Amino acid sequence: MEEKIKEAARILAESKHIVAFTGAGMSAESGIPPFRGEGGIWNKYDPASLDIEYYYRYTQQSWSIIREVFYKYFSSSVVKPNPGHEILAKWEKEGRLDCVITQNIDDLHKVAGSSTVYEFHGNMSRFVCSKCGAKFPAQSLKLTEKPPVCPDCGGLLKPDFIFFGEGIPLDAYNGSVEAAQKCDAFVIIGTSGQVSPANMIPSIAKQHGAKIIEINMEPSTYTKHISDIFIQGKAGEVLPKIDEEIKDKR
Ligand code: NAD
């Protein structure tokens, strides 16, 4: 592992444009459970509650689960960024990382200080009105057992993350594709690569000549196919180690 960390650090130190692509594993050490697999949220709850048609049709049932899972379980007052999030924010401030493309909806990259974050699946810390389109920080709303309504027009509010059956936000999609095409190093962190179309972004970087560095506890769908370096370990431990190595190369 030490050799791989050194090699990753060498590539990153020489790169002008670095992009990070993150998934649920990035936030696991912050205490946010994955959706699938052991300890996964969907072992306990029915994922249908996150279907957009279900939300509009059976709003009360859907909202009860969403509130329980997302706004009690891992609200931002409980979870905090881990050292992995902090290193990515630091690399952006140092001018070496162009952006983070994240599939996570937990806002932890921004809380850690990253500013260019393409939220491929939206962000649970905002709500959007299904009638007038106004957006509100979750913290400004009183989230009770009743489905939340828009303070401006009274329309139904929806968490501003992507439900099943909804499209990817265009600005996040376009920004991610552009960043993947431009970068010379692309770091995949904590994602199994099973969720489409997000899972196509790393291949775009590969096709455009980027070196692919992957950090994951387990091999993923990317590992054999596109990863140049696979570092098996926890994001919150591996990223600080790479950063230490980069320091020596400055
Ligand atoms: P996934 O659950 O399919 O895969 C998670 C991956 O992270 C696995 O490959 C696992 O081996 C790895 N992993 C677990 N702990 C790790 C750690 N400490 N360090 C490094 N890797 C670790 O996740 P996915 O690919 O992101 O797809 C799940 C979908 O569910 C995404 O679309 C995402 O939007 C959503 N989701 C979001 C959150 C969140 O916002 N934090 C949490 C769960 C799921």
Image (tube, rainbow, N blue to C red):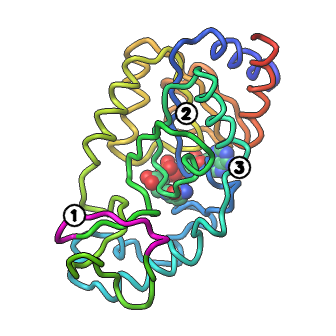
For label 2, the SS is strand
Residue 61, percent from left and from top? 35, 87
Residue 41, percent from left and from top? 54, 70
**Residue tagged by mark 3?**
82
For label 3, the SS is loop
Q: Is residue 165 left or right of residue 89?
A: left
| Residue density around tag 1, few if under 14, some if 14–19, many if 20 or more, within 10 Å | some
> As shown in the figure, which amino acid type bears the numbered disc 3?
Asn
Range of residues picked out in magenta: 130-140
**Residue tagged by mark 2?**
188
Tell me which numbered mark, 1 or 3, is placed earlier along the sequence. 3
Tell me which numbered mark, 1 or 2, is placed earlier along the sequence. 1
| Residue density around tag 2, few if under 14, some if 14–19, many if 20 or more, within 10 Å | many
Say if mark 1 contacts mark 3, CB within 8 Å. no
10 above or below 134? above
Q: Quadrant of residue 212?
A: top right
Q: 203 or 98: nearer the eye?
A: 98
For the N terminus, the image quarter is top right
Q: Which mark is residue 133?
A: 1
Q: Is residue 117 magenta?
A: no
Tell me which numbered mark, 3 or 2, is placed earlier along the sequence. 3
Query: Mark 1 to mark 2: distance in Å?
Result: 33 Å
> As shown in the figure, which amino acid type bears the numbered disc 2?
Ile
> As shown in the figure, which amino acid type bears the numbered disc 1?
Gly
- Residue depicted at 53% across the width and 46% down the height: 23
Q: 60 or 134: nearer the eye?
A: 134
Query: Mark 1 to mark 3: distance in Å?
Result: 33 Å
223 above or below 84? above
Q: Is residue 111 left or right of residue 84?
A: left
Q: Quadrant of residue 207?
A: top left
For the C terminus, the image quarter is top right
